[in-house]
Image (tube, coloured by chain):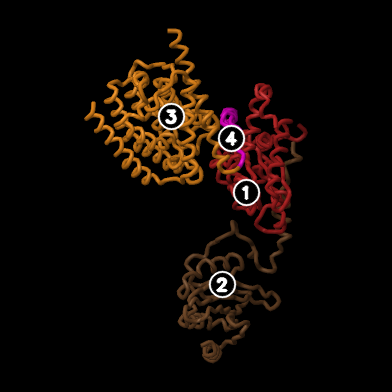
Chain colours: A brown, B orange, C red
Amino acid sequence: MNKSLKKKLESDFDSSVEILEKNGWTITANKNQVLDILRFLKGEGFDYLALISCVDWIEKGEFELIYILSSYLADKEKMHLILKTRIPRKKPDFETTIHIFENAEPYERELHELFGVNFNGHPRLEPLFLDRNYKTPPFRKDFDTRKYVEETFGSIKSVEGKK
Amino acid sequence: MIIKIVEIIAIPVLAFLVGIFFLGLSRRIMARIHWRYGPPITQPIIDIIRFSYQESVSHGVIFDLGIIFSLAASIAVVLFIPLGGMCALSSSGGLLVILYLMLLIPLGVALSSGEGANPNISIGISRKLILSLGYEVPLILILLTLMTRYGTISIADIVSQQGSGWTIFSVPLFMSGIAYFLILPAILEIRPFDMASAPQEISSGHKVEYGGKYLAIITIEHAFTLFIGLALFVDLFLGGASNPLFFFIKMLVVFILCIFINAVFPRFRIDQAIRYLWKWPTALALAGLIATSVMW
Amino acid sequence: MDRNQITKWIKNPKKMGSKYSLWAIYFCTGCGIIEIPPILTSRWDAERFGIKPAPSPRQANLFLITGYVTLKTLKAVVRTYEQMPDPKYTVGFGSCPINGGMYWDSYNTIKKLDKYIPIDGWIAGCMPRPESIFIAVTHLWTMIDKGIADGYEKYKEKYFYYRKNQEKALGELDWPPLHPMKKKEEGQ
C-alpha cells in the first residue's frame, strides 16, 4: 500500500516524496495543488489534521506552510505525513482548508496573528492569544524583540524613587 | 430575677465559646486524620480577630442589616435550649419557637448576600435554602414524635422526664433518634452536605462578597449553628445533663462522630441530598411517629 | 513563634492577627502554581502557620504571584489586588516577577512587577522549593512586626504613578481609579 501511495503521489501530482522513517514521510508540493493533495489524502484514510505551522525563510523571501496529517486506521499501520509548500513572503496569501478539515480554524487564526499570513475564506480572522496589534507580526525573523522590549517596557519608570 | 438576667447574658457567651472550640477542634482533628499537624485549636479566634481589623466593603443598607438579623436569630434560638442546669427562657414555648426561629438564620443570610451582584452568590444561597427545606421535613416529624411521647413542648420538661432512661434507648423512639443522627450532618453543614459553601466549586457561595467585619459575623454564626444542632440532640435524646461540664462532654462525643463522617465522605449534589433526606430519615421518623401515637 | 504570648495580643491585636492568619488568594498565575498544592497538602503542611487558600479576594490577605505575568494576566492581577481589603501583603515568587526571569526578552511579558503593584518581598528561584515559602512567611512576620511591610500604604500614597505605569503598559483601562490621584509637586 505504501509503495503505491508513493508512486501515485509522485505521478499524479507535481510533488516529491521523501521517506524519513518507516512511518513518517515528507511531501514537498506546489502551492497550487495543496488542496487537491489534501483531499486525496483524506480519501486515503489520513483524516486527522494534527497541526498547521509555518517557517520563515527570510533569505529566500518565502514562508513555508507545513501540514501534519496522521492516520488512525485499525487495519493499517499508523503513519504521519508532513506536507510542505512555499508561499512568497511579500504578499502571503493562501486558501483556507476549513472545508476539508474543520479543525484548521484556530491554527489558521494563530498563523494570521503571529506571522501575518492571510487565509482567504476564513470566517473569523481575529486575534487569538495576543492582546494588541504589532507593527510587524512577532514571529517573523525581522521583528527585533530586544529593541521592542527596550522601547515598551524599559521606558516605564519604577515608582521607588518618587516621593 | 438577677439569676435570670445573668443566665441570659452568660448562655450565649458560653455557646459561642463552645462553638468556636468545636470549629478549631474540627480543623485539628481533620489535619491529624490527614497525617499532618494542624493549626492550633485557637485558630478560629485568630481568624475572627484578623477579620475584624480589616476594612470591609458594603453593598448597601440591607447588606449590613440582613447579617445582623441572622445573627440575632441564632442568638435567640440559643436562649431557648437548656444548657446543663441552666435555661434562660425555658417556660415560654420551647420546641415550636425553635422550629420557627431556626429557619430565620438562612433567610437572613439570603437577604444580605443577595445584594451582591455575583452569580456565585445566587447558586450558593439557593443551595442553602433548599437544604434547609430538606432537613426541616424529618425534623418536624421527629419533634412531633417527642411532643406526643412526653406530652409537653418545653425542652426543660423533656430533659427532666428522661431521668428514668434516655430517649434513645426507649422502644419506639430509638427510630427518631437514629433519624435525627442521620440528618445531623445536614444541620451542621459538614460533608457530605457542605455544598452550600463549597470553596472549591462556587468560590464559597454566599460568602464570596463578605469582607472584613461581615466575615467575622458569619464565622460567629457558624459557631452558633454548630452549638444549636448538637445541643438539641443531647437535650432531646441523650438526657441532657445536670451541670454544663457533662453536657459539654456529651456534645463532644457526638461531634467527634460527626467529624469522622466529615473525613470520609465526598460532597453530594443538592438533588442527591434532597433525595436522601426525604427518603430514609423521613421514613424512620414517620414510623417512629406512628408507633408513638399508637402506644401513647 | 509568639502565638501564645497573651500580652502581645492585648497590646497590638491588629498586627498579631494579620500575622498568624494569612489567607492566600488562590490565583494561579504562571508555571509556579505547581508548587502551591504541595504546600497545602500533607507533606509540607501550611495550615500550621495559619495559611489557608482563600476562594475570593474579599476574604484574602496575602497575594502570591507565582510566575511570569503576561499583559492579559496583568489586567487580572491589578483588578484582584485592588479588590483585596487592607492590610494586604504581596510576595513575588520565582524569578520572573523580579526581572523577567527566563522571558527577559519576550514581547508579551512584563519584566518588573514592582512598577505596577507594590511588592513586599521576593523569593528567588525557578521554581523555589516549597520550604522557601515557609522561610518567606516567617520573614514576612518579622517585617510585619517591625512595621516595614507597608506595600498597601505605598499604593495609596503613590497611586498616581502606579496608575500611569499601568496605563502605559496596558493601554486604556476600563475601571475607574481606586484612590484619589494626587501628584505631589516638585520640591515638596
Q: CA distance from mark 3 to mark 4?
A: 35 Å
The answer to whether C35 is drawn above or below residue B128 in the figure is below
Q: Classify residue C145 as left or right of residue B219.
A: right
Using the rendered image, report if marks 3 and 4 lie on a common chain. Answer: no
Residue shown at 29% from the left, 23% from the top: B150
The outermost residue toward the left is: B294
Q: Is residue C50 magenta?
A: no
Q: CA distance from mark 2 to mark 3?
A: 63 Å
Quadrant occupied by the C terminus of chain C: top right
Q: Chain of mark 4?
A: C
The outermost residue toward the top is: B1
Q: Chain of mark 3?
A: B
Residue that numbered label 4 is attached to: C85
Q: Amino acid at mark 1?
A: Pro
Helix, strand or loop status at disc 1: helix
| The magenta segment | B36-53
Q: CA distance from mark 4 to mark 2?
A: 47 Å
Q: Amino acid at mark 3?
A: Leu
Quadrant assignment, res C157: top right
Q: Amino acid at mark 4?
A: Pro
Residue that numbered label 1 is attached to: C38
Counting from the top left corner in percent of width and height, residue B244 is at 48, 20
Counting from the top left corner in percent of width and height, residue C185 is at 73, 34
Residue that numbered label 3 is attached to: B230
In this rendering, the label closer to the viewer, 2 or 3? 3
